[in-house]
Image: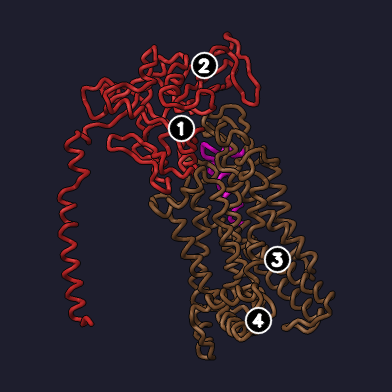
Chain colours: A brown, B red
Amino acid sequence: MVHGEIWTLKELFVLPNEYIYWSIQIVMYPFMTGLVAGAFVLSSLYHVFGIKELKDIARFALVFSFALLFAAPMPIVLHLQHPFRGINVMMTPHFTSAIAAFGIVFFSYGAIVASELWFLYRKHFVESALALREKQDKSLYENILYLVFCALTLGVTDISQEALHKDEKAIKTLAGIGIPVACFLHGYAGFIFGSVKANALWMTPLMPVIFIMSAVVSGIALCMLTYIITMELRKFLMGIKKAHAVGFQTKEDLKSVEINVIRMTAKYLLFFLIAAISLELLDLIFRGYTAVKSWDVLRSVIYGRDFAAIFLFQYGLGNAVPFILFLLPGLTLRRAVVGVLLVLFGVFMMRYNVVIGGQAFSLTFMGYMHYELPIIPHDWETLKEGLFGALGIFVMPFVLFWVLSHIFPIFNYEESH
Amino acid sequence: MISRRDFLKYTVKGAAGLAVPLAAIEIVNPKKILADSQGIGKTRWVFLVDTYKCVGCGFCVKACKIENEIPYDANVTRTWVERYVNTKDGRLFADTPKGARDGFTTNKIDLGLGKFQDVKNEDIRRSFFVPKLCNQCENPPCVQVCPVGATYQTPDGVVLVDRTWCIGCGYCIMGCPYGVRFFHPKYHTAEKCNFCYHRISKGLKTACVQACPFGARMIGNIKDPNDPVTKIVTTERVGILKSEYGTKPQVYYIGLDEEVR
């Protein structure tokens, strides 16, 4: 069977070679890179602009951004017909292609996040390594941890006040450089789509900007969600153990900190949400107003075939409802959770409507293609480019986050920049 | 220990020394020598389709599939034929069932999803066939977007794919406004019409030109003023597909219509 044939239904006049070649994993790719960029921007709001209220979530967001970073290229690997040749992009980059810059952008961004994390946690690495060195009869796990922390110090054990002060400066600089690079990482994902002149829906110079705005929205939303979940877990564990956390004295303290952080972060979420929706609506209105050749078929897709996906799920459930939820005074945790879940769903639907919607009509403008997501996998292709492949990609950063949190403590860490 | 002065001296000497052989490469440009010895630069392959002569038999599609080893029953093809039908009540139908591999044998228009529309002969105002293939654009978007340079343009204007280097990202398929690209069912790399490059570079005609019983397809060298294709393209009124994309397609059509997509 031809690639794409299994999930594509053709209607009316569609060219013989046209299929939905870019499927669910290409929906996941901008979704995941968007989360990376968004989480980083959130952490930088504190480190660069010194927004104190975001201090607690900033460190959290940075570690999460690092975890997400590893998951971001995975959808592409699963999508490639020759995944083992993926390295060719770095071996012989063909720079007229937007994808060719991937290696460079990705690794420079990764280097920035990694070095910022290193400066942020350097003191912790040194202290942990020294403490473990002192300890007698180490277990196997402690031995491994000792080796990891020793390696992570990179041989620098100076944690004097002066050195730490320099670290702080470095963090600020790196976070500052990181913002444009994070925006570039994702804006360029938008450029990959926006520059395809053969695709009537994708081709708009607004695409990179729309992608960045919705990326920040989704990144903040995911950080809020994960933050709430981990805080709730801590409260739950405290209830069981009756133990005192290091940073906070009681459950009530924890709760008040949590809701304050969430209310503050929600304001930034709203700001970026307004920007994202405005740009998307501008794009839609402009297309309708100029009504070039492709508008007839685009209109039939946007207002007809994909109406529910675009207006009910994306704009309605994913944008309007959470917008109202966050605007209503007295934001509670429960309302925030519902809100961020809907925002994440809305951003996912936006990616879906762009990627799949852009392939919903034929190059002839006289036919349509329907996408049927493979749910039950019956071969390798329907597994990796099906529901389970996409879910796997979505779960991956959470698992990585859990692993990373053993090396980068996210809470109960007194020394904070 | 080397002194700073010596270090700078050696650096300058080394750089100057390296520059000499590098300059030689520029003087003796291998590409240019190859071009001069093989007559490259004197050929630019173009294609001419006379839609008035096409009857939609599909022999070209069959021949192409066999010649270029595209699995016969796979629903992809390097070339195909489209049928356009205008009815008297102003409706436009178009289809290309299986790329017209088996020809158009009935009046039933393929509407997809297993549905067909029967159009009666007396209801037809006009009807015609349009063969399609890669346009071997002068400004190919597929070459532009390939992230690894696996697809490239030859000096004589044909766009080829390197099956050993293609990563299968599909960006070129998305970038082509003509829908000529697809993934090869066996090699899983980007695949497209290449004007039967293995044949034309040996002085043969393409498989589709050879198979066409009505002479609707012709291939020629636009840089040769005596080539029959060149004569028609330069002296008669011919059209190209989707000029708005700025790709400068090199497949010319006689009898092109506004309805053709």
From what the image shows, is residue A210 above or below residue A362?
below
What amino acid does circle 3 point to?
Thr
| Residue A396 percent across, percent down from the top left | 64, 58
Work out which residue is located at the far top of the displayed protein and give it: B122
Kindly state the secondary structure of the residue where label 4 is placed.
loop
Q: Nearer the viewer, residue A151 or A386?
A: A151
What amino acid does circle 2 point to?
Asp
Q: Residues within 10 Å of mark 3 (few under 14, many from 20)?
A: some
What amino acid does circle 4 point to?
Asp
Q: Residues within 10 Å of mark 1 (few under 14, many from 20)?
A: many
Residue at the image point whose x is 39% and y is 45% from the top:
B144
- Chain that bears disc 2: B
Q: Which residue is mark 4?
A: A137
From what the image shows, is residue A88 above or below residue B135?
below
Q: Which residue is mark 2?
A: B102
Q: Which mark is residue A226?
A: 3
Quadrant showing the N terminus of chain A: top right
- Disc 1 versus disc 4: distance between alpha carbons? 68 Å
Q: Nearer the viewer, residue A322 or A348?
A: A348
Q: Residues within 10 Å of mark 2 (few under 14, many from 20)?
A: some
